[in-house]
């Protein structure tokens, strides 16, 4: 079959374009290779011994690597991030609408010099009233947990919403995961022991983590059920194995021993843009040709065989497969997961996988929120501008997570919020939140796609509407998945 004149014209035009762009091909290729090689030299641990052997040469690998780096940059700067930062800097320079600093700084919570925390005290507290406490584990990467200063504006915004906020400094130069978890354990213990003294409610202590902080918060919350399982299993069969490999199981037992005193479980978890399956994340990064350049590699590169010991999703799945029942008093009763659908660093499937596992083990209240039109959801950036639509949405979800449902309805703060409310016992309410572009509110119920993540006698979709205050980056329905 002969070519038509249109096909011939198209190929001729493409050939002419290639000839015109040919002089620019070499400079572009040199620039791309230089960027990838420079990043490899500064981020690949193997470059310390032999830089020549680790530099990527194949064009496909270089293209995949530069594409991943570009996507990561968009994750950090995409969406409303730049607008929010500009708004915050403008307000700071003009000193307009500046929140009052209510922090009590450098409180000592442990024996080491680095064991310091900031306590943000809400204003307008009623005498004798007890308010919820949110403990923030700083750090989007595992090596950045000591940079608590960057999270102070976020903590002050949460404090202004009617809750105590604790911002500890954990880890330090050369600190490992076990050291970070040990420091965080001491900070949480300090909160439990002193909550009544500063006006907080020890029965409503919630952990908030972002990125690597969300991963470590989840690992910390599993300490009590894991210690309980191993104690009971070792009585029946000494050396009982929970995980799939003996090395992973030994690694899990090793870091559990670092936390000697079994603390009381926290009331809830707020996990934003987290990573919960280390093996899955490493596989995803290998597909993008950045398996030796990522923060996951620098933290878990030497623990490939024991990655399961640091994967909350895998640990919960192992407990479920061994028919281990986790009583409500041994684990957080409320879990809120927040993720951006277009996040390319820690992908949405990370939160979805943990969400399903928590539903399977009957955690009383599991909620997940997905922002379809956003990439990375960064609360430390979003809450810089409390009046923005994104900040208002996050504050609404955090407020509903730390406050019992009936206490929220009554506007009460204090000890009256310990009784769980929701559907009758034995019923399950499950749905997945998605966002819809320019969908009218009355159509949210019928058009929102629903994905079932657990088995239950009843499934309902209950979108929650909110009034938009300004430019809306994410028209949305409310995704709630809860089990009572």
Image (cartoon, rainbow, N blue to C red):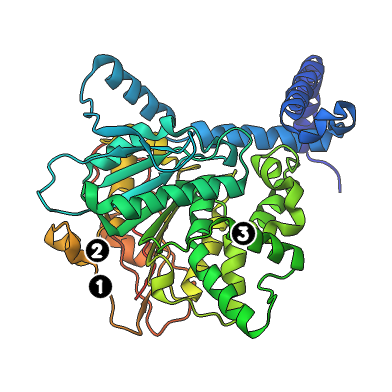
Residue 197 x %, y %: 23, 49
Q: Which mark is residue 404?
A: 2
Query: Badge 3 is on which residue?
Result: 311
Q: Which class describes the residues within 10 Å of circle 3: few (<14), some (14-19), or many (20+)? A: many
Left or right: where 101 falls relative to 362: left
Count neighbours of disc 1 (C-alpha within 10 A) and say few if under 14, some if 14 to 19, many if 20 or more.
some
Q: Which residue is mark 1?
A: 421
Which residue appears at 23% of the width and 18% of the height? 95
Q: Earlier in the sequence, mark 2 or mark 3?
A: 3
Vertical arrangement, residue 173 with respect to residue 142, above or below: above
Q: Secondary structure at mark 1?
A: loop
Q: Nearer the viewer, residue 27 or 143?
A: 143
Between 427 and 152, the residue placed more toward the observer is 152
* Of the two numbered discs 1 and 3 in the rendering, the one whose residue sits closer to the viewer: 3
**What percent of the width, then of the height, locates residue 258?**
58, 55
**CB contact under 8 Å: marks 1 and 2:** yes
Question: Against 470, is 38 above or below?
Answer: above
Instruction: Tell me the element at label 2.
Output: loop
Q: Is residue 292 left or right of residue 442?
A: right
């Amino acid at each position: 079959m002969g070519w038509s004149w249109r096909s011939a014209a198209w190929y001729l035009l493409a050939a002419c374009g290639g000839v015109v762009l040919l002089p620019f091909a070499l400079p572009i290729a040199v620039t791309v290779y230089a960027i990838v090689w420079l990043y490899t030299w500064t981020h690949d641990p193997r470059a310390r011994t032999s830089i020549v052997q680790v530099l990527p040469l194949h064009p496909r690998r270089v293209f995949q690597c530069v594409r991943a780096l570009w996507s990561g940059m968009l994750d950090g700067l995409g969406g409303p991030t730049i607008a929010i930062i500009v708004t915050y800097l403008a307000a700071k320079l003009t000193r307009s609408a500046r929140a009052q600093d209510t922090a009590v700084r450098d409180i000592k919570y442990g024996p080491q010099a680095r064991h310091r925390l900031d306590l943000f005290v809400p204003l307008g507290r009623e005498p004798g009233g007890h308010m919820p406490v949110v403990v923030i584990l700083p750090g989007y990467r595992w090596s950045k947990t000591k940079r608590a200063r960057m999270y102070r504006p976020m903590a002050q915004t949460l404090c202004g919403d009617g809750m105590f906020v604790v911002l500890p400094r954990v880890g330090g130069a050369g600190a490992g995961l076990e050291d970070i978890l040990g420091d965080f354990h001491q900070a949480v213990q300090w909160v439990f022991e002193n909550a009544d003294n500063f006006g907080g409610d020890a029965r409503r202590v919630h952990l908030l983590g972002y990125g690597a902080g969300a991963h470590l918060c989840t690992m910390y919350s599993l300490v009590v059920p894991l210690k309980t399982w191993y104690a009971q299993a070792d009585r029946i069969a000494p050396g009982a194995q929970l995980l799939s490999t003996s090395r992973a199981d030994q690694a899990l037992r090793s870091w559990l021993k670092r936390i000697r005193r079994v603390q009381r479980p926290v009331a809830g978890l707020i996990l934003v843009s987290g990573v919960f399956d280390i093996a899955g994340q490493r596989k995803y990064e290998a597909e993008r040709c950045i398996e030796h350049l990522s923060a996951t590699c620098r933290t878990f590169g030497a623990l490939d065989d024991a990655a399961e010991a640091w994967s909350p999703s895998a640990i919960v799945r192992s407990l479920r497969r061994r028919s281990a029942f986790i009583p409500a008093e041994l684990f957080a009763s409320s879990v809120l997961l927040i993720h951006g659908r277009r996040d390319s660093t820690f992908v949405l499937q990370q939160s979805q996988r943990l969400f399903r596992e928590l539903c399977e083990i009957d955690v009383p209240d599991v909620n997940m929120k997905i922002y379809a039109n956003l990439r990375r959801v960064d609360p430390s950036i979003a809450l810089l501008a409390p009046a923005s639509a994104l900040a208002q949405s996050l504050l609404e979800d955090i407020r509903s997570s730390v406050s019992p449902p009936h206490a929220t309805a009554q506007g009460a703060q204090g000890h009256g919020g310990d009784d769980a409310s929701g559907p009758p016992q034995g019923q399950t309410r499950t749905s997945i939140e998605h966002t819809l572009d320019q969908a009218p509110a009355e159509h949210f119920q019928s058009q929102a796609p629903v994905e079932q993540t657990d088995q239950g006698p009843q499934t309902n979709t209950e979108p929650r509407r909110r009034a938009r205050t300004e430019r809306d980056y994410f028209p949305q329905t409310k995704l709630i998945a809860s089990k009572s």
